[in-house]
Image (cartoon, rainbow, N blue to C red):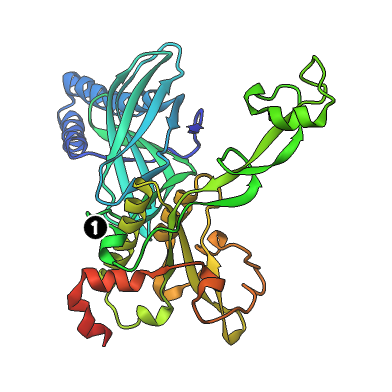
Amino acid sequence: MRRWRRPFPRQRPFKLTPAGWVFILYTIGVGAGAINTGSNLLYLIFGIFLGLILASGVLSDIDLWRIEIDLNFPEKNHAGQLCLIPFRMTNKKKWFSSISLTIELVGTLRGETVRLSSYVPTCPTRSASDRRFQYIPSTRGWFQATHVRLKTSFPFGLLQKWWTYPCEGGFFVYPPLHPVESVSVAVPSASPEPNHTANRRGDGTVLYGIRPYRPGENPKRISWKASAKQGSVGTSLSEGWLVREMEVDQKNGFTFLWPRNDFFAGRSLSEIEDFISAAASYFSSSLEKGHEVRLLAFVPGMGRPAAESIVEVASTGGPPENGLMEFLSLVDPFRFPDDAVRPYFKSWDSTTGPAAGPTTVGPTTVGPSPILLSDLFLKARPAHRSHEK
């Protein structure tokens, strides 16, 4: 959640509305008529018109004064899907309500400016109004919010005044998902890696070892046979009892391999986006079926043109699947690997890059049954075979 509030900014820009320009022209005409005729009535009307212009500026400032905006960005969203960005507008004023406000959120997505707006008819004194922005992102990437703008034409619609607050924050826009065949169907030779243990302690089904009981542990894990053989069992659970320690079970899964940069050479931007969308769809489909998904990538060595390494894409925080989708949201195949995706590489050195590694794919380097994303993409789009040749 992000919060912005400014009591009274120094710069309060405004512009005249079409109705305001007409009103200004009428005011000038009435003033000229009052001077020519010397009519006190025209002078009175002229003064009222000037007072309305002044009151419009003052009341619009009061309308924007002491407004607090709380933005709650979503964690993620997919391109092409409706994204709701809720916010709360709080009126901190003691005596005046805020009427006819437009809240505008300005941000950028892949270099393009995005403007979202929401209208708030009224917000009474010392109360809050919950609203939301509606946004359908057209492409993947990171939506970066830059500032929040409060606008109003209250009370007479003669001028529009706005206050701007800088802000930070944003959310990932994942690639669009499309129905795809399962990996096993798309690549008949591909099969999930079987369940195996991770050779570390945890909640699993394979015995890791026997150790003394610790206070607070579940008594169901006590190994009665091992405790009886030891022969030093007391009446208390803390005296001589032994418990079974299990290994963590690894789920079955797939290992995908990101293609080398030459795969993307000569391809159009639409083909690149289709490839990334297909990769995201295969990842999502595999994860929904309970498989673990790993993504490996060929990375050229920094300063060593002939060197090449294979690195694993991992999450910088949160569930592992978030790291995969965030990588696909930010990756630019024409500049791979750039600064945006390097934080997602395991064992990456910011000065030297990855250590020089093998250039071949095999069980010792990427694990069993690696699946080339380029093969999945070409099988799904046979028309690209001629281009590949």
Whole-percent x and y of residue 130? Answer: 35, 23
* Residue at x 69%, y 25% (from the top left corner): 217
Q: Amino acid at mark 1?
A: Val
Q: For this view, does 235 lie left or right of residue 337?
A: right
- Residue 188, compared with residue 22, is above or below; it is below
- Of residue 336 and residue 169, the one placed in the foreground of this image is 336
- Of residue 263 and residue 268, the one placed in the foreground of this image is 263
* Residue at x 57%, y 80% (from the top left corner): 358
- Of residue 257 and residue 152, the one placed in the foreground of this image is 257
Residue at far right of view: 232
Q: Is residue 61 visible?
A: no
Quadrant position of residue 85: top left
Whole-percent x and y of residue 370? Answer: 43, 69
Which quadrant holds the C terminus?
A: bottom left
- Residue 67, compared with residue 300, is above or below; it is above
* Disc 1 secondary structure class: loop
Residue at far top of view: 95
Residue carrying label 1:
180
- Residue 4, compared with residue 352, is above or below; it is above
- Residue 22, compared with residue 173, is above or below; it is above
For the image, the number of numbered tags is 1
Quadrant position of residue 241: top right
* Residue at x 40%, y 13% (from the top left corner): 125
Q: For this view, does 375 lie left or right of residue 144?
A: left
Quadrant position of residue 242: top right
Whole-percent x and y of residue 238? Answer: 80, 21
Q: Residues within 10 Å of mark 1 (few under 14, many from 20)?
A: some
- Of residue 316 and residue 104, the one placed in the foreground of this image is 316
Whole-percent x and y of residue 222? Answer: 68, 27
Q: Is residue 335 visible?
A: yes
